[in-house]
Image: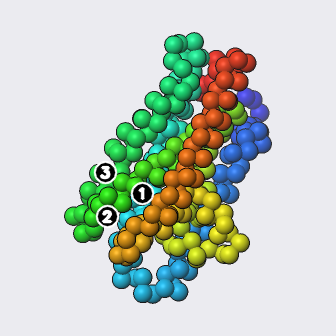
Amino acid sequence: MTGSPARRIGGMILRHLYILKGSWPRVLEMAYWPTVNMVVWGLTSQFFTRHSDWLAQAAGVLIGAVILWDVMFRGNLGVSLSFLEEMWSRNLGHLAVSPLRPWELVAAMLFMSLVRTLIGVIPAALLAIPLYDYSIFAMGLPLLAFWANLMVTGWAIGLAVSALVLRFGLGAESLAWVLVFAVAPLAGIYYPVATLPGWVQPLAWALPPAYVFEGMRGVMFGHGLRLDLLLGAAVLNAVYLALAAAAFLRTFHVARVRGLLLGTGE
């Protein structure tokens, strides 16, 4: 590139502006994170301001919520990253002509998601015991139910993200982080769903994590496990996982028929 430094600098700036112009996920991501952080922590501070009686138990509730939230987050990333690694290595074309069936690919990604989540979350949960004198394992069997539901929610989001990346290309890979955090303000991770504005609450109850975190707080405050909340989460998870798997398999089939799998990669 010839010319003055200003011209060369302008050329590089123009290049990146064109990248932003052609990738709506990147533009969305820039405005997205500050907004989500503001909403989540704004609602959290608002709730604790109005319910000072919760402060005595806030530490345990928040640590438990963080650990369970990470189950869903890691479950999503486990699926998304397993798929993205195949795209980054340009391996999808090889998989498409191998004996591997698409549903077997999905099953492998879900299993790897479980492995990644266990590796990521268990050490953090164990470390919370000596550091904060808090054990999430004290919840007992309800913990398994919460874990399973949040894992399935993460799987559904991960499969949906994988379908979108396959459809729109690697420019949409940031959706692996964006979509799961889109759920965070509505999930009631650190505050009850009732804290949300009235018109938003039906949206929250359409998401499985809202049922899980309400159930978690009930168990931690000694109210026992609410089976209605557990059933609500399970039913919604079954619907969302089926829809996400169908969307991924359909997108994969179309990409294979059109020969688009050979063009993926870094």
User: Does label 3 or label 2 sit earlier along the sequence?
Assistant: 3
Q: Nearer the viewer, mark 1 or mark 3?
A: 1
Q: Is residue 25 left or right of residue 40?
A: right
Residue matched to label 2: 139
Q: Quadrant of residue 264?
A: top right
How is the protein colored in the picture? Answer: rainbow
Can the viewer see residue 242?
Answer: yes
Q: Quadrant of residue 102?
A: top right
Distance Cα–Cα, label 2 vs label 1: 10 Å
Residue matched to label 1: 146
Q: Amino acid at mark 2?
A: Met
The crowding category of the residue bearing disc 1, from other C-alpha atoms within 10 Å (few below 14, some 14 to 19, many at least 20), is many
Q: Quadrant of residue 92?
A: top right
**Considering only vertical position in the picture, is 254 above or below 158?**
above
Residue matched to label 3: 122
Identify the residue shown where x is 58% and y is 17%.
Answer: 96
Do the CB atoms of the residues marked 2 and 1 lie less than 8 Å apart? yes
Identify the residue shown where x is 36% and y is 58%.
Answer: 143
Can the viewer see residue 59?
Answer: no
Q: Is residue 188 left or right of residue 251?
A: left
Q: Amino acid at mark 3?
A: Ile
